[in-house]
Image (cartoon, grey):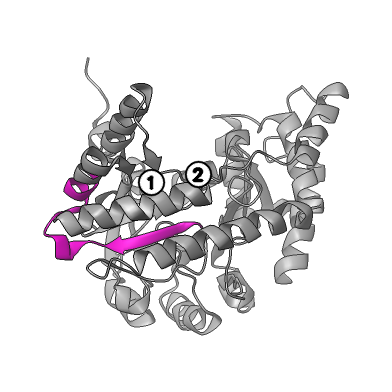
Amino acid sequence: MRLAKRVSLVSPSITLIISAKAKAMRDQGVDVINFTAGEPDFDTPEEIKEAAKKALDQGKTKYGPAAGEPQLKKAIVKKFERDSQLKFSLENIMVTNGGKHSLFNLMLALIEQGDEVIIPSPYWLSYPEMVNLVGGKPIIVPTSAANNYKITAEQLTSAISPNTKLLILNSPSNPTGSVYSKEELEAIAEVILKHEIYVVSDEIYEKILYEGTKHVSIATLGEDILQRTIISNGFAKSYAMTGWRVGYMAAPVELTKVMTTIQSHSTSNVCTFAQYGAIEALENEEDFIVPMLKEFSQRRKIMLEGLETIPSITSTKPLGAFYVFLDVSSTGLDSLQFCQALLEQEQVAAIPGGAFGANNCVRLSYTTDSNSIKEGMRRLKNFVDSL
């Protein structure tokens, strides 16, 4: 079969190697500690499920508007004004099939053949692949642990060329848990405005923060930067709704119209009754998020304390999301070798940092119970000590 050339531009996921091996071991009855999950281990709150059930009973089972149910779009507009003092109209908002879909719609609408997209590394693994699929060129900018894996204004300036179209910014970050401060974002915004590029701010983890850290959206730093910012968000992480596939995007009206047209010819509307669950999530979020965040905070504390007993590997302190990013370069193993050996010797599953553009690192997720985290840290220490 003669396949389209574009598929050759997409790399297979190295995370599948670990995931498949871990699954096979669990199927054989092996006690595997799983630190790979990129989703909360909590069930979707009952109130959200009940709202979707009610919508089903009311016959919300038909096609809906491609850009989203008006009631959900109104709730999203209120959310932006409440949380960030951003004033959007319904025309700025588009509901998508998950946050990932909002980003893919954006790439299709904005990026042309040869356009460059700047992606700070470590990055969420799908960013470069999306750019490749639409014919763009990912420009990877490595960041350092010394700066908590955040791109600086100086690095951004150096990476910009006449072909640069877009910067992808993720705060709080997957995989590092780093969070950009207002001052850091102001410096980045100044560069964006000077060079007249655009920025997409992926804010899917905005509610999952620790130690009093505040989320700041780059879009809030003035009208000029707002006009060059696209905000991507969704319900998967903060509301334990990964399987619901409801995301959204806020963008300039001209761009939203184009993305809506694209979506109308690909997926049509987002699952209608699921959108009514999303409305409930936005209108009563404190009831769900506060207890989940309290539990994540405790798990984070346990994992960080466990890592302190392993001085030969280092990590930055995550202030958001639910990941810890470890530098394992002192072991002499690359990320895949480390994860394969850790799984085989100690039955602990972790994600190789090579998937995120950092082959000297490993990502651990604390979306599992506290006892498993304690045991996983003990096994990790055994493994590193054995090296």
Query: For the residue marked with disc 2, what is the amino acid?
Result: Lys
Residue most toward the top? 1
| Residue 118: % across, % down | 34, 63
Q: Give the alpha-carbon distance from disc 1 to disc 2, as whole Å.
A: 8 Å
The answer to whether 274 is drawn above or below residue 354 in the figure is above
- Please tell me how crowded label 2 is: few (under 14), some (14-19), or many (20+) other residues with Cα within 10 Å: many
Report the side of 38 relative to 131 (left or right).
Answer: right
Q: Which residues are magenta?
A: 322-339
Q: Which mark is residue 126?
A: 1
State if disc 2 and disc 1 touch (CB < 8 Å).
yes
* The furthest residue to the left: 332
- The residue at 61%/32% (across/down) is 264
Residue at image location 88% in from the left, 24% down from the top: 58
Which percent across, then down, holds residue 23? 35, 28
> In this orientation, does residue 52 appear?
yes
289 left or right of 124 in image? right
**Residue under circle 2?**
100
